[in-house]
Amino acid sequence: MKYLKIFFVASFLVLGSLGCTKLDEKFQGDITPAQVAGGSNSVSSLLASVYTSMQITYQDQSNYMAMSEMTTDELIGPTRGPDWDDNGVWRVLHAHAWDGDNLHIRDCFDQLNSTTFAATDLLQYSPSAQQAAEARFLRAFSMFNLLDGWNQVPYRDPGESVIVPSRVRVGPDALTYIIAQLTDSIIPNIADAPPVNKANKDAARVLLMKCYLNKGVIANRATPTFDAADMQQVITLADQIINSGKYQLMANYFDNFAPSNGNISKENIFTFNRVGGQSTGGTGNTINSRWHLTMHYNQQPSGWNGFTTLGDFYNKFEAADQRRGVAYPSLPTGATNPGNRVNVGFMAGQQYDLKTDAPLTDRNGAPLTFTPDVKLIETGDNLEVTGIRVNKYPIDYPNDGSGNVDNDYVYYRYSDVLLMKAEALLRTNAAAGALAIVNNLRAQRGASALASLTLDNLLDERGRELYWEDFRRQDLIRFGKFLQPWAEKPSDDPKYLLLTIPNTQLAVNPNLKQNPGY
Amino acid sequence: MTIQRMLAKLVSSLLLCVLFTLTAFSQTKTITGKISDDKGQPVQGATITVKGTKTGASTGADGTYRITVPASATTLVVSSVGFASQEITIGAQSSIDVALVASSQALNEVVVVGYGTVRKKDLTGSVASVQAKDFNKGTYTAPDQLIQGKVAGVQVTNNSGAPGGGATVKIRGNSAVTGTGQPLYVVDGIPLDGRSARAGVLTPDLGGAGGDKTNTPAGNPLNFINPADIASIDVLKDASATAIYGSRGAYGVVIITTKRGQSGAPRLDLGASVGASHIMRTVKVLNASQYVQALTYYGVPASNNYGSSVDAMDAITHTGVVQNYSAAISGGTDNGKYRLSLGYLDQQGIVRKSDFKKYSVGFASNYKFLENKRLGLDINVITNQYDENIAPITNNAGASNSLIGQALQWNPTRPLKIGDSLNNFAGTIVNPLSMQLGYNDYSKVTTALASISPYYKITNDLEYRLLYSINYSTGTRRTSMAPYLIALPDIAYKGWAGIGNSELITQQVTHTLNYNKQITTDLNLSAVVGYEYMKFTNKGSNMQGFGPGDGSVGSAGFGNYNLDFTNYIQFSNTANRTIGSFIDPTSELQSYFGRVNLNYKDRYLLTATLRADGSSKFGENNKYGYFPSAAIAWNIAKEDFFKTDLLNQLKLRAGYGKTGNQEFPAGAAQAKYSFTANGGLGQVNSPNADLKWQSDAQYNFGLDFGVLNNRISGSVDYFHKTTTDLLFPNVQIDPAPPGNVIRWTNLPGQVINKGVEVSLTGGIVRTNDFTWDLTINASFIKNNVTGIPAPIQTGTLSGQGLSNTFVETIRNGLPINAFWTRIFEGIDKGTGQAVYQDNGNILHYAGNPNPSTLLGISTSLNYKKLALIINMNGAFGQKIYNNTLNNVINVGNIRGRNIALSEYQAPVKESLSNPVTSSSRFIQSGNYLKMANATLSYGIGNVGKLFKNANLYVTGQNLFVITKYKGFDPEVNIDQAAGASGGNQVPSVGIDYQAYPTARTITLGLNFSL
């Protein structure tokens, strides 16, 4: 009996001690930093993730596009009765009435920073010079957009803990850093285009052009000045791209955005690669949000009846200007468009069934006729049809359902290089050369030649060429027009030249400061 | 031995026997009688003994007994399991009837407190015990519903009217800044994982991912337990009781004890019930003629009048048939007892094509070995499978993509069918009948919970016990949608199929040493120390694909042959498939715990506990948490100075303890890199090596009393619970990994819940033929948040016009999940537009979704063989955000869709262009009192010699609800958590959005034994 007792007490102790574990947590479907470091080809996988991190930022309509276009005279997101109130989050962007709680400003700030994180993180895993240069380019690209929008660029060193507050580079200091990165680390090490769907030397040159072109703006957004040396840098870089002979303007403007743009476009300099039917692994809406967000419910494919352009902007185009809209040949399985209706560019007036050519109606049974006038809050019976709709990307019908459309998202185009060169020339009193560039572009697009080039009509030309490509906010600020009134937007306080640092980030990072005036 | 000697021995023996009998006869007498319970029902198997002897008898099924006692016997002792034993003076009586008092009212009742039991009179903490006979009556799929309204301080909210739908259980208020806030469930000593193995499939077009990565609401994780097998449910409320469960005890602990076999002859209990369910309450929308009038009233084209008259809600609902059968065979000897139970439940939902079938087999047994019977063994097995057909009712889809929204919105003049064909058309309006027929969603969850527990009495005072358990649960889900759902853009002309699998395993080893010693006559010591190791595994996979073809108009897709597409998913479009699999990181919990109970003179009681919990989920710098508690109690009624017949029980209790909550996903404390499509790889979290449990500190002061021989008894408790180190999915500090990753932190700040709980039980009338008992419990709870660094948004509204709209906040100075939105001031008579305070630009506090008062009322009336039991529950002071009214049946929908009758009849005409905006307009009072269930039963007793204890009853569930709320049911909680998709989020409270309506069920049933 006594032995039994001892046996049980002993077994209790033994089993108890055997049960003790060190409580180490082991991943089974994920990996640790040590495994990343020990794996072969880890860096190329990490680099792929840096690229895909940019999908939600640029392709989803509610992030960088909302920052760069909805805040301008090119785009409005009206509240249409039961639709698109969304707690007023769109209205404040267009009306310049946002604050530090704005959801989309917050998300865009986070997303741009997520790319800088992923690109920085890669650098701790011994990348090749080319890989490091690609990552540094993508980081510089994000940092420049952060600097442009928020004037504050948080950063950490590779491998630094992400739960301690990051440090912040502000204004011209941040620009100096980006220029140094591009000049010293990126351009010398990065491969030449093609392919344009990877970071490349020309893309880096375009970014560097933008750095120099906007240098005076970043120093003083309210009253920018433009240093001749900076403008000369822009011209030199543009010439490097132009003289490479790799790029030319397309006969059909919309080829640059078509499902097959990766194969046919000679204008695109930097794109996000998409293969029809294949997921990129990215999150957020894909490019198909570009057509869904603007099209009416009764169009094909059924849209969300959201964003439109404003009448004044639509009226900047000549009727013959190809960029105002064409009937783009559709893929055989899509809508065949028997009536040859405008299906890309600006969709104004009566809309038609692109398969049968029957006139469409709205959900009230009234004709689906898009009208130029549009209000922030639509209250009339016609609230479904106000606003002219804009879609630059010809629809990839077969892949629309999955969202894995074939259209490569376009970050940089050759025509932007030409227009930036023209602007640099104009700002350094070389208007004749600038006019020649602009008129050459206009001729290619089917528009009549301009008699003379001024800052005002150059800004308009940039609008016509680059509308809804996420440059408008930067352009309006650089040309000093951002605070002026336009439809459904009053003239406003200079504080709106900068976006708000999200309150969520201010709460966790003492190194960030809210921008002045907010 | 010769035959003669044998005969001689036999004869002498017989003679001896006769002699003995004769002597006995001359000195004994026979007593007969009947033993009944306090309601007059016969008690079978009660033991009647002569005090101080071994002479005994037991009662038959009709409660009668016959005992022969020595003439010298003076006292009979009557005892039965579940009742307090009684001593009766024999005197000259030859017939003695005894009414036993159920031991739930008796003080020797044992209460399960985790790793042991205590006598109720020794309790120092706040523990409520509900016995099977006091459970809610009716058909329930999960045990949490059995105690709704039964325990003060416990709020049980059925999240959905769907059969098998989930429930939210909140013990002593709400302190969950993340996670579910649900208590820890412990079944026969086995703490559950808390998650369900119901597989998730993310259905396209039905909204974003919710719990378990589906868009239909999560089911109840306790569905695998057969309510008929439960003997009692004990609720540990205060920290002195829950601290023994350490880092998992903060939201309270619910201990479920299943039924056990009793020694005696085999006994077969059978039960059967059949019932019918209808919708309890409808939401009033326009009928066809009102709709036609409304078209004119709002100036909408008459083309919206299609000339028919249909009731879409009626078309998608029906009378649901409910069948429930149970059988249990039990018995054994003192050295080997068993109970085997079978159960079958088939519950049709009131929404067509939704149902819940459950098959249960349970086995519980106890064996004793060795000559001295010191070695014992418990073996328990619960096996269960439940099959569900789930309706396409989602938490967060737009109204046109969820069945209830579709039905509420359906234009009542538009035919659902044209001839024999479904009326399907392109656009954004989905025919609810098509949705119902074209959507199939079948889930199966199979669970086996098995434990083996040997124990050995080392000495009379010391017992060692080992418990090994495994809880294995696996789920499959098959969901498909038909190509003819042409108004769903992704599904149209393609169809879709998805298959999901999941597996949830919990393994446990527990060693305990129990010591129980009467040290002196006045001092009793009982103590337990133990070690526990648990390991949790959660994994799954899924595949889904759209039908073949490009979805152009007229394409066949998966075809329209009424087949289940999940049977031939390989023919889906290769370019349009997704597959996935996952496994959580290893998750282990290792604990050391101990408890000491001291009882001095039955007057002064002390309980102290300590648990050390280590978890693999915790950060490197905080691997172990320590959770102490202490409580004292003073039995004033036992004091010499306190001798009164009036007050026979009076006990004061005070306790304090610390508990924790570790409800965050594994893999949050260390850096984690995940793979993405396209060969990508990237960090996906913001690791926090300091991450630890959320802490709760709770004070409890209580008073138990009983008067008039415990005819009236009750408790009053005051509690004050402070939750700190709030586990919170905080924002990342930019620059941080992509995907708005969560940075799990322990947020500074406090959530304080404090309140008073009162429960009272009384026998109002006690006569031979008629008794009336009444139990009332009430809780009054206040909640406040302080010290958090920045307000937290949650309460995400859903549907068109309300994207990214939050209506709840967790911020300092307000109750948790306070409504925070713009203040509605009315509809402008001129413009028909809504007017808001501050033009709607500034959001304000707009109400509290947490109830201030909970009420439970149970009453039973017995007249001879008739018994009526009524259970009611209510909640008061809480507000509900009616998201359904906000944008499913708002007036703007009159163009082609239906609207709420209340809005049409409103005195001021609202403009159709008035934007759909979140505001206090849709925050409504959620006060209610519900007739949860009522049962009228007739005790037939024995029928012939075959059937014993037959009992016939009729039960009504959800008979009525008294409320001003305009939705289906004020008892509602749609999961509208905010945060990263899937996984843990900041939960919402009190949002109603096109929920599965509540059923009213009438059941007829019969129980009997063989």
Image (spheres, coloured by chain):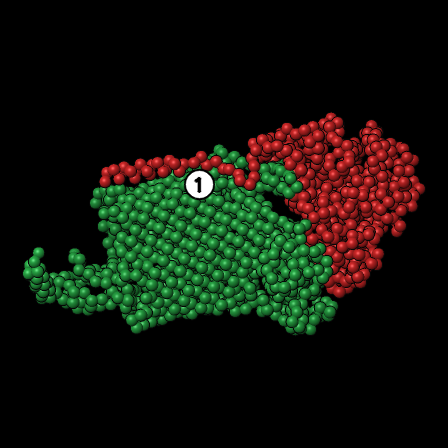
Name the residue furthest right: A451
Q: Quadrant of residue A473?
A: top right
Work out whether A321 lies above or below B22: above
Question: Which class describes the residues within 10 Å of circle 1: few (<14), some (14-19), or many (20+)?
Answer: many
Q: Amino acid at mark 1?
A: Leu
Q: Chain of mark 1?
A: B
- Quadrant assignment for the C terminus of chain B: bottom left
Q: Which residue is mark 1?
A: B589
Q: Residue B761: tell me if it is visible.
A: yes
Across and down, in percent, residue A124 comes to 62, 29
From the image, state the color of chain A.
Answer: red
Work out whether A42 lies above or below B298: above
**Relative to the observer, which residue lies in front, A493 or A77?**
A77
B581 left or right, relative to B512 = right
Q: Quadrant of residue B1003?
A: bottom left
Q: Residue at x 57, y 44 (%)?
A: B791
Q: Residue at x 63, y 60 (%)?
A: B482
Q: Residue at x 37, y 53 (%)?
A: B257
A230 left or right, relative to B205 = right
SS at mark 1 in the image? strand
Across and down, in percent, residue B93 comes to 16, 68
- Quadrant assignment for the N terminus of chain B: bottom left
**Relative to the observer, which residue lies in front, A284 or B877?**
A284
Q: Residue at x 73, y 35 (%)?
A: A199
**Relative to the observer, which residue lies in front, A366 or A106?**
A366
Work out whether B738 lies above or below B493: above
Across and down, in percent, residue A184 comes to 73, 26
Query: Which chain does the green colour mark?
Result: B
Across and down, in percent, residue B640 comes to 23, 50
Work out whether B737 lies above or below B989: above
